[in-house]
Image (cartoon, coloured by chain):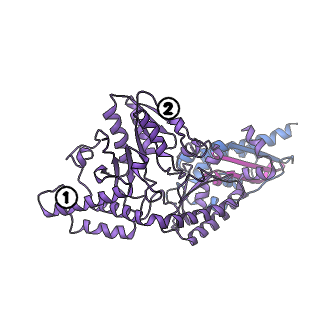
Chain colours: A blue, B purple
Amino acid sequence: MAGLPYGPVVLDHYLHPRNVGSLDPADARVGSAVVGSPMLGEVLKLQIFLHGETIVQARFRAFGGGSAIAAGSWVTERLQGHSLGEALDIRSQDIMNALELPPVKMHSALLAEDAIRAAVADYTQKHLQ
Amino acid sequence: MSLRPSVYLDYSATTPVDERVVQAMLPWLGQRFGNAASTSHAWGWDASEAVEQARTQVADLIHADPREIVWTSGATESDNLAIKGVAQFHGGRGRHIVTARTEHKAVLDTCHALEQRGFEVTYLDVDAGGLVAPDALAAALRPDTILASIMLVNNEIGVIQDVAALAAVCHRQGVLFHTDAAQATGKIPVDVRALDVDLMSLSAHKTYGPKGIGALYVRRKPRIRLEAQMHGGGHERGLRSGTLPTHQIVGMGASYALAGELMETEVPAIRALRDRLWEGLRELPDVFLNGDPHRRVAHNLNVSVAHVEGEALLMSVPELALSSGSACTSASLEPSHVLRALGRSDLLAHSSLRMTIGRYTSAADVDLALRVLRAQIQRLRELSPLWEMREQGTLGAWMETC
């Protein structure tokens, strides 16, 4: 598999994905997102669970290549212990750097950033009412 | 990931060179080094005899006359010579060419290049099984059509086109017919007279011969005229200049002779292994066969494993050498043009795997492949949001929204 453009960080997350699973989307403490599309070959589901102001848990599932799975896994680790504001500070470039993704895999980093924003928006929406 | 694959399931990409072929080639890299074009001494005569014997061996496998075989560097060059050669020679008569959307890039890109030079190309749709309907070809022909090019066996899905019927449609309209048969030799009987084709591209390395050598069959009766693409010493009756690589040519001849001898016994054995692989995979839910199940070569299995992406599945099975229909190094995540042409949804096109087996595949190889594929499909489905939705019965509704 020398032809695949992945370094050790992606392979580690791909082979041993962290925080795979689902949280109850109806729970008020949970923010949920499903982004991407099967047509594009990438779908990422991300859920965050807050205790007060802090994200204490994150769970993901991914349909996509190695970079999509690794990005989802990395993001769940990165989010835990942070506030919503801090979550929104995570950008696709941070994901590219952390996973050492090549430019052709930018779509996976962008998708993970979208998932964070959508999960935060879902949580925020629940608490506006 | 430096783990070396232990099971090779990519025979449609290339085959190992048969040991008997290697042995046949070696003398021509040693003492018998002459140039077949040297007519003034014994080294040249020796090489020339070897080249002509190989020409006969290649011709025999496809029931051609040896004088109808032109050596090239491989099927890509043969496709270029056939299509550009016809376009340039007959361009004064018409500038329209017909091919299919599922052709190999060697044909599609050659056609694209001709479009840049003022030719018009019709890319035919195929049916859900990947086959071109003769009626669809007939409907696409115009008074200015000069050539149709439809491959005999598809490299991705292994379906066998009804080339005899397609060629007949063309000949009724005075249109020349080319077929790329690189994936067919040694896999199915090939008879240029029965198929009634004018031009046929051949390759050695898909048939247990060496890479870098191929041939173009050019019909003599009636004689098919082509414009040469390579100019030089006038080799190959002026159609393809360049010193003939004797060792490669001898290798191609030997591999084709072997294919002719072995086909009857090896193809049924390969078919039984391929069917065993398919039986083991189809037990899983949502696994779909791509390409017509019946009009298909014995060694090809192309499946879509729904809810799992092809690249992720490939990465998960480093023990296996196989290929995916989704282009994993591409930024656009574009799925296989062949599967798209079958009308497969993008979801299934992104989830495809091609497994092609051959002369050295064992039952133990197939069983190992099944074991790791089944385990990894299950692991990746546990990771997949699409599989979760499928289990919850919400996938269909969600797909509507995106």
Membership of A75 in magenta stretch? no
Membership of A54 in magenta stretch? yes
Q: Looking at the image, which residue sits at the far right?
A: A129
Question: How many dots with numbers?
Answer: 2
Q: Residue at x 61, y 48 (%)?
A: B350
Spot occupied by residue B390 in the image (x, y as percentages of width and height): 76, 50
In the rendered structure, which amino acid carries the disc numbered 1? Asn
Residue B338 got which mark? none
Q: Residue at x 21, y 45 (%)?
A: B232
Marks 2, 1 in one chain: yes
Instruction: Give left or right: position of B293 versus A27.
Output: left
| Mark 2 element type | helix
What residue would you read off at disc 1? B35
- Between the C-alphas of marks 2 and 1, the distance is 46 Å
What residue would you read off at disc 2? B140
Q: Disc 1 sits on a residue from what chain?
A: B
Instruction: Give left or right: position of A36 versus B330.
Output: right
* Among the 4 quarters of the image, the one containing residue A85: top right
Spot occupied by residue B100 in the image (x, y as percentages of width and height): 50, 40
Spot occupied by residue A119 in the image (x, y as percentages of width and height): 76, 44
What's drawn in magenta, residue-wise? A41-70
Q: Work out whether residue A91 can be spotted.
A: no
In the rendered structure, which amino acid carries the disc numbered 2? Ala
Q: Nearer the viewer, residue B244 or B321?
A: B244
* Among the 4 quarters of the image, the one containing residue B317: bottom right
Q: Nearer the viewer, residue A14 or B231?
A: B231
Q: Which of the two discs, 2 and 1, labels the residue nearer the N terminus?
A: 1
Q: Nearer the viewer, residue B193 or B245?
A: B193
Q: Nearer the viewer, residue B401 or B248?
A: B248
Spot occupied by residue B162 in the image (x, y as percentages of width and height): 50, 46
